[in-house]
Image: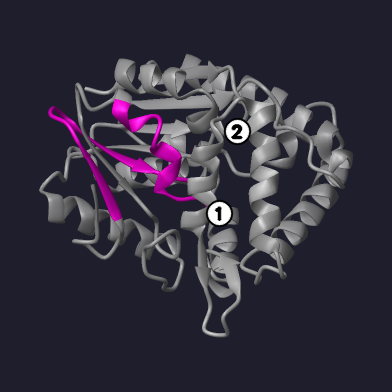
Amino acid sequence: MTKDRSALAVHDHGGDGPPLLLLHGAGRTLADWAAVAPMLVHRHRVLAVDLRGHGRSPSGTWSLPEVLRDLDAVLDEYGIPDALPVGHSLGGLLAVLHALEHPGVTPGAVNLDGYGWGRPDQYVDLDPGYVGERLAELRDLVAWMSGRALPHDGLKDLLAQQRVLSERLGVPYELLEAGILRATHRRADGRLELRPEREHALEMLAAIDSLDPFALFRRTPQPLLLVRALRPDPPVPGTDRYDGLMAAFAKGLARDLAELAEQRPDVTVAGIDATHAMPLENPRAVADLILGFAP
């Protein structure tokens, strides 16, 4: 059942047992958990939220302190301050930040493929200067695409793209369609746009850039489950020049995660046979890892 009792839109999946709070990625919505959550409720109370500026949650300045306060408000409203945060992509970083802010209360955090752009030295066998230039291009591209009004028939085109993605990844089209429809809203001028709105999308991107994921992991005293995708994302027209960059990052990420797990016995590292869209693409594997880690 979806409710708006708190400032954020919340889907209460129900269930009994230790609570879980599910957090989606940038530009996504709580709809991404539709296939995973039902596999968790036999052992856990499960809530999923739309982050501020996303889905059906209200907009507002997008800063990490504000977003973390939003999560605290949800947990207070539902009386589950000790919920285990489980996040995908940006949500994974927020899960770790939430745990870091609540030692002794939050039992740990689950980060599903949330590692940002990484450091230039994480791109194995590539010159850091070259990496820096390519990452600057990618950031500019993402910023240009963020929070813009859709062109005429833009929604139709987006849904057609989801149909193709459904076939490539083996994800039920209905899940992808629900995510797109929840992520769009009609502006005052009548045009549709994908949330968050441009101003707040740019604030969000700046907040992501400010984070050093591995510094966060090392500072967080609670147990962590850090998961990475084992398959590259499907090619996007016009971005194939970055394929080698992403492959180099995947190698460096695997290396650094293994090193962290060796240093910290309470850090569990796992891989999932999926692309970055793992909650949609391989929900069973995602659910099994969460169930194996959660209290």
Q: 139 or 121: which is nearer to us?
A: 139
Residue 127, above or below 143:
above
Q: Amino acid at mark 2?
A: His
- Number of on-image labels: 2
Q: Secondary structure at mark 1?
A: helix
The answer to whether the residue labelled 2 contacts the one labelled 1, judged by CB atoms less than 8 Å apart, is: no
Q: Which residues are magenta?
A: 10-38
Q: Is residue 14 magenta?
A: yes
The disc label shown at residue 19, or none: none
Residue position for label 2: 276
Disc 1 crowd, CA 10 A, few/some/many (<14, 14-19, 20+): many
Q: Position of residue 196 (x, y in %)?
A: 52, 65
Circle nearer the N terminus (2, 1): 1
Q: Quadrant of residue 55?
A: bottom left
Q: Quadrant of residue 220?
A: top left
Q: Is residue 184 visible?
A: yes
- 72 with respect to 120 (left or right): left
Residue 30, above or below 150:
above
Q: Is residue 130 magenta?
A: no
Q: 34 or 276: which is nearer to us?
A: 34
Q: Amino acid at mark 1?
A: Ile
- 184 with respect to 122 (left or right): left
